Amino acid sequence: MNASTSYEELPSTRMQNNDLEPSNLQFSFKKILPIKKNDAEMLTRLDIQFDLLDAIFSDTTKVFTDQRPGNASNKVCFKDLYINSLYQSPRCSKVLKDKMKETPAFALEFGKIALLANIGRINTTMAFFPEMRTALRTYHPVPSLQKTDGNLQDAPRIKNCLKAALLSLELKRAPTSLAAVLEKLRQGIKPPTSIVNLLFIMANQATLLARSHFEAPLDFLDLFMPVNIPSPHRARAFLWLVYHYLEDPTSSPSDSPSTNPFSDDFSRSNPGKVPWLPRLSTDEMQKRGENIDPAEEVEWGSKMCKERTSFLQRLISASAIERKNRSEFSSSQVLELAPRRPRAPRQIYRDDDREGGFKHYEPQQSVPYDTLPPSPITSRVSPTYPAPLAPVVNKQPVPPRRTMLEHAFRIVSSTDPLAGSDEELDDHVKVDYERRLRVLNRLRGKSPTPPMPIYPTTAVAHERSSVRWTPYPTTRRRPIVR
């Protein structure tokens, strides 16, 4: 391998870190890692770096410890390691597990799209089925990874499945730094963490990986970006890192030789460095013919984009019709459709037409009746009675006395509630008062006590006291407690 190959500057932002200790841990400033696409735009092979994914999952080197329970002695390739980890996730639905088991091609496609979500290339706003209705997601067909009938799910469900893909020994506390992973590995704990959790840590600490294992200006995230580095070389560097942190850290600078099966002459002569990553020109990369979309994939992607656009148009039209119908069918129209029935007119009877039962009475003109002798009843509110009514020339005969119920009904029907209660009292009112007094006497068992004379009082209270005193009249009285 030619070590003098010229470097092509690649955009990368770095931060200074002294070592891998958690106390000095600083997460990398992420470049624009997620794929940015508008709704109904397909993800091409160049967007997802299909040839890189194919090189990673097609490697058959069985050097990774099987992370399934009871299979620690088995060695598997990266494809089986990663897909089995997804399959064992508690948040992987039964339907998805059955589809992965029945259709290995779908399991491979799902593993590739999950790897992109694992390192951050697929964000949580993407979905991969056209009938998606929520406005928080954008639909994107992926022709190169949707050749089977299986549903790739949407990005949030994939992310939930990944976050739950942990080993049984790390359900309570999983390592969160590369230093913690290496420490567990040196203690003889193998595997030190799940492959999914390791990739999360690598994506978050890409700067630390760049400082320890890459030649400037590259870092870990550049392996999954559209850069002018051949896909097989990037896949080899990725697998070298996975083996280094899951199986054997002797790839780091030490006196012992490297045992990493993915090492090359460059990594063996430079302990701790990933295999050589040659930088090619744009013309050289085009000659390699990587990540070229076949015509049938482009046609299928365009078809799905049109289907998505048509679905959105139907959805918008249905929403507009629903809003229009809702606005037209207003409350006023409901009242028009069901008009209120006219209320029956109130029937009024005069006193001379009375019959048995309850009747409505029409208010009479204020024609006074002959007054009865003054009643001995005294009011506690006012010690005097109103003046007698003026004499009338044409006197009418005294009508028969009303019952208490009839009188109460007449008062309710003909009396203004806002008028004074002591104004214009007639004989019927006085008779009613007498009847009420007799009822109270029977209930009380004795005649009424003479009323106490009322004197003007002045309430005097201290600002901090809860007792009110009445100094008038001059006779001694008890304090009134509130």
Image (cartoon, grey):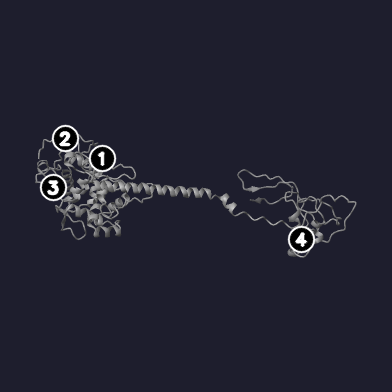
Q: Is residue 40 left or right of residue 421?
A: left
Q: Amino acid at mark 4?
A: Glu
Q: CA distance from mark 4 to mark 2?
A: 112 Å
Q: Look at the picture and state if 333 lies above or below 216.
A: below
**How busy is the neighbourhood of tag 1: few (under 14 within 10 Å), some, or many (20 plus)?**
some
Tag 3 or tag 4, which sits nearer the N-term?
Answer: 3
Q: Earlier in the sequence, mark 3 or mark 2?
A: 2
Q: Which mark is residue 406?
A: 4
- On residue 262, the disc is 3
**Disc number at residue 291?**
none
Q: Residues within 10 Å of mark 4 (few under 14, many from 20)?
A: some
In terms of secondary structure, where does tag 3 sit? loop
| Type of amino acid at the residue the image marks with label 2 | Tyr
Of tags 1 and 3, which is closer to the observer?
3
Amino acid of disc 1? Ser
Nearer the camera: disc 4 or disc 2 = 2
Residue name at image x 79 percent, y 54 percent: 378
Q: Which residue is mark 1?
A: 28
Q: Which residue is mark 2?
A: 7
Judging from the image, what secondary structure is the residue with disc 4 in? helix
Distance CA(mark 1)–CA(mark 2): 23 Å
